[in-house]
Image (cartoon, grey):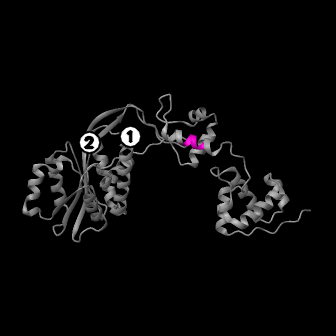
Amino acid sequence: MVSAAVALGVSDADREVLERWARSGCVSHRVARQARVLLAACDGLANEEIARRCGVAPNTVRAWRRGFEAGGLGWLGTVAGGRGPARSLGAARESEIVSDTLFEEPPDGSACWSTRSMGERHGVGKDIVARVWRENGLRPWRSDVFKLSRDPCFEAKLVDVVGLYLDPPEAAAVFAFDEKTQVQAIDRTQPSLPMVPGRARTLTHDYKRRGTLDLFAALNVSTGEVLHQTRKRHTGKDVLAFFKWIDLHTPRHLDIHIVLDNLSAHKSKPVKDWLAHPKRARWHLHFTPTSASWLNLVETWFSILTRKALKHRTHTSVKDLEDTIDTWTSHWNQNPKPLRWTKTAEPIIAKTRRAQTALNRANKPATHH
């Protein structure tokens, strides 16, 4: 009869994590097995019995118990120094793989290296290349979209808009305003199939265009409420009509501050003439820098609207599209969620300066002596 070992002491929170890892298909096999061994040790089973049930050696069970007692959950999955498979590449060859990934183009004209093509170049397996890339934070198949603003007043406009978000003036309503132009009413060529267990809903890959509209929206930064209109165009007269809509729905005792981009329609003569009237003294426009639409909070709301209401829906007409936008926005305004801006201007300015320096360095012609 094998005597049971002393039960492994573990807190309720740690045991819950161990139980989740033991049945998880996402953690590594080593971590899942260690979790099962430690759970059995928590129940007071003998080390030899745990080893038999989990398919490991009794000394392994003892070593894992000691490791958990010393390092807790953070110890699971670690490999002691000098253990595990030896690295098949030296530092010099790993450096060559990193250098080729960063500075060389694939000879077959591909846009980026794959693990297999890089492995063939250096005579190693794809898994070795994948490990080198992972350890050096390289993902050549990915690209991020960016554009630095060339606005000579970038920093001043940034400070103005961010200050308006973080410290709005008293007795004022701050709106983030923009147009989402050419919103298409997309109709599918065949009826969609509903979602059922084990299968997602379906949409045909091809579609029919049933017309477009322009969506005007002004997000109240403090409350999250949205004023909107759908129009056929976005001329200066359309912008003026929407400004009048904002003016009508804003209490008379509040000033109106509008964050908007540099579209020519926003600076058209009808708009300027209307704003110049003494009755519009409460109106203040704050223009974002050029190529900085990310600074306008209403763009985030447009993204939410598209993702939740428009992207996977079929519209047989512009009127149908209009009704969808009206309905969804109405429900949004019943329980509005303010979109909070949290970052101050200083780190943004520092980041853009670093990016400009890097861009200048990349575009600097090479000199040969």
> Which residue is pictured at 74% across the width and 52% down the height?
83
Return the mark for residue 319. 2
> Which residue is pictured at 74% across the width and 61% down the height?
38
Secondary structure beneath dot 1 equals: loop
The mark that comes first in sequence, 1 or 2, is: 2
Give the camera-side residue of 3 and 369: 369
Q: CA distance from mark 1 to mark 2?
A: 61 Å
* Disc 1 crowd, CA 10 A, few/some/many (<14, 14-19, 20+): few
Give the camera-side residue of 271 and 134: 134
Please provide percent x and percent y for residue 59. 83, 58
Return the mark for residue 325. none
Please provide percent x and percent y for residue 255. 18, 66
Task: Assign the N terminus to one quadrant of the image.
Answer: bottom right
Which residue position is annotated with label 1?
367
Question: Which amino acid type is shown beneath numbered disc 1?
Answer: Thr
Image height of 197 relative to 207, above or below: below
Please provide percent x and percent y for residue 91. 62, 46
Give the camera-side residue of 261 and 135: 135
> Which residue is pictured at 10% across the width and 49% down the height?
269
8 sits to left or right of 266: right
Main SS of the magenta part reads: helix
Residue 77 part of the magenta segment: no
**In front: mark 1 or mark 2?**
1
User: Do the numbered discs 1 and 2 sit on residues whose CB atoms are within 8 Å?
Assistant: no
Is there any visible trace of residue 134 in the rendered image? Answer: yes
Residue 95 part of the magenta segment: yes
Q: Which residues are magenta?
A: 94-98
Task: Assign the C terminus to one quadrant of the image.
Answer: top left
